[in-house]
Amino acid sequence: MTEKQIVVLGAGYAGLTAAARAGKRDRVTLIAPETRFLHRIRQHETAAGHPEHRPAVADLIRGRGVRHVRARATRLDLTARKVFLDTGEAVSYDTLVYALGSRTAWHGVPGAAEHARTAEQAAELAERLRSAERPGTVAVVGGGATGIELAAELAEAHPRWRVRIVAAGQVGGWFSARGRGHVLRVLERLGVEVHEQSTVTAVDAAGLDTARGRIPADLVAWAAAMEPHPLAAEAGLAVTASGRAVVDDRLRSVSHPDVYVIGDAAEVTVPGTGTLRMGCATAQPMGKYLGRVLAGRTDRPFAFRYAVQCLSLGRRDGLLQLIHGDDSMRPTVFTGRAGKLAKAAIVGGVVSTLR
Ligand SMILES: Cc1cc2nc3c(=O)[nH]c(=O)nc-3n(C[C@H](O)[C@H](O)[C@H](O)COP(=O)(O)OP(=O)(O)OC[C@H]3O[C@@H](n4cnc5c(N)ncnc54)[C@H](O)[C@@H]3O)c2cc1C
């Protein structure tokens, strides 16, 4: 039997987890630019100036039959089954695993791309805060999990800076009443100014224009939304209006069955659970499942139920929110040190189960 060539695009929570499991049976090529794992769920810590915890990709795939090609895919030819790289090489595949994840979305807000910095630019944010001549004001745009974690972390690490969190709706509005209450109490304790119902309409060098008026800021951290990598749509895979690839119950592209799509790049709907949100919490289980499929260890459809949502709120506080399998809230939360320890254990578990 000839070995199949499996090419995995992207070494995030989804891609690396799938590659490390699939390499046991077939020849796997993992294509991603980084030498150290892109540990996105800790980028708010990097932005606050804390040391990075990023294991080497080589260590994570050691002994797993995976060849890592350090490069970016620039184009896919889904008919010829080829991936073109920024190194000038082209790599052929029998099966492609598309796991290019997502990135922060600007949604066309004027000035945002020019003046704001994102979690992907965490090191630059840290440097700007560290090297500023005097403490100023930083506005964190986004009332979702990333915005809250960033605002709390920055406020705690830089108590002389004034930190503002600016949200189009409510900050943490999807949590249970107790969960949101805890988030707001911690932000208040850390001195974070909360601006809700304040959709940002423009960004410039001195701050934000919002639906409720002007918010001055010396530095803007943008965490308003995430969008999938555009290569899937550019290549002609079937995608939704937001650019996520449409897949079947085995995570295969509905337009190209020799392409699997996992992680933030995929629009996955699980009966009884619903359409999965973007998150490490959904990306890694998809990677584990697909790794088992490719290693010939299961032929069942992908199944997924949620269990908890968790947030870090600075170095000493956190929130563990219990949820139903369909991601709806239960009333129970664990806060303070218990919440923080739970979050740290979950983040640690993510790394230890990458391979
Ligand atoms: C600060 C922050 C905190 C977060 N906290 C949480 C949390 O607590 N819980 C949670 O569930 N989610 C959280 N998220 C969201 C989570 O990080 C993402 O949903 C998750 O990273 C998606 O995983 P993925 O494997 O699909 O893609 P990614 O992690 O985005 O990985 C994509 C991979 O593709 C590679 N790549 C990109 N372009 C190319 C290219 N052209 N060619 C080759 N390779 C390429 C990248 O280098 C990377 O290896 C957080 C995000 C941020 C920014």
Image (spheres, rainbow, N blue to C red):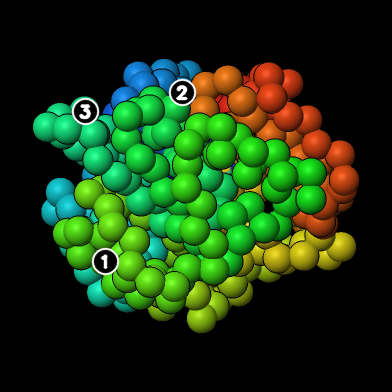
> Marks 2/3: CA distance?
32 Å
Q: Which is more toward the observer, 67 or 247? A: 247
The answer to which of marks 2 and 3 sits earlier in the sequence is: 2
Q: Amino acid at mark 1?
A: Val
Q: Which is more toward the observer, 152 or 351? A: 152
Helix, strand or loop at mark 2? helix
Which label lies toward us, 2 or 3?
A: 3
Residue 254 sits in quarter? bottom right
**Residue 97 visible from this viewpoint:** no
Is residue 305 toward the left or the right of residue 39 in the image?
right
Is residue 75 toward the left or the right of residue 306 in the image?
left
Q: Which mark is residue 60?
A: 2
Residue 134 sits in quarter? top left
The answer to which of marks 1 and 2 sits earlier in the sequence is: 2
Q: Amino acid at mark 3?
A: Arg
Confirm if mark 2 falls within 8 A of ligand 1. Answer: no
Helix, strand or loop at mark 3? helix
Q: Which is more toward the observer, 12 or 316? A: 316
Q: Which mark is residue 345?
A: none
Which quarter of the figure is the N terminus placed in? top right
Residue 225 x, y percent position in the rendering: 47, 61
Helix, strand or loop at mark 1? strand
The residue positioned 35% from the left and 40% from the top of the image is 162
Residue at mark 1? 203
Q: Amino acid at mark 2?
A: Leu
Residue at mark 3? 130
Residue 4 x, y percent position in the rendering: 49, 47
Identify whether 211 is placed above or below 185. Answer: below
Is residue 257 toward the left or the right of residue 68 in the image?
right
Confirm if mark 1 falls within 8 A of ligand 1. Answer: no
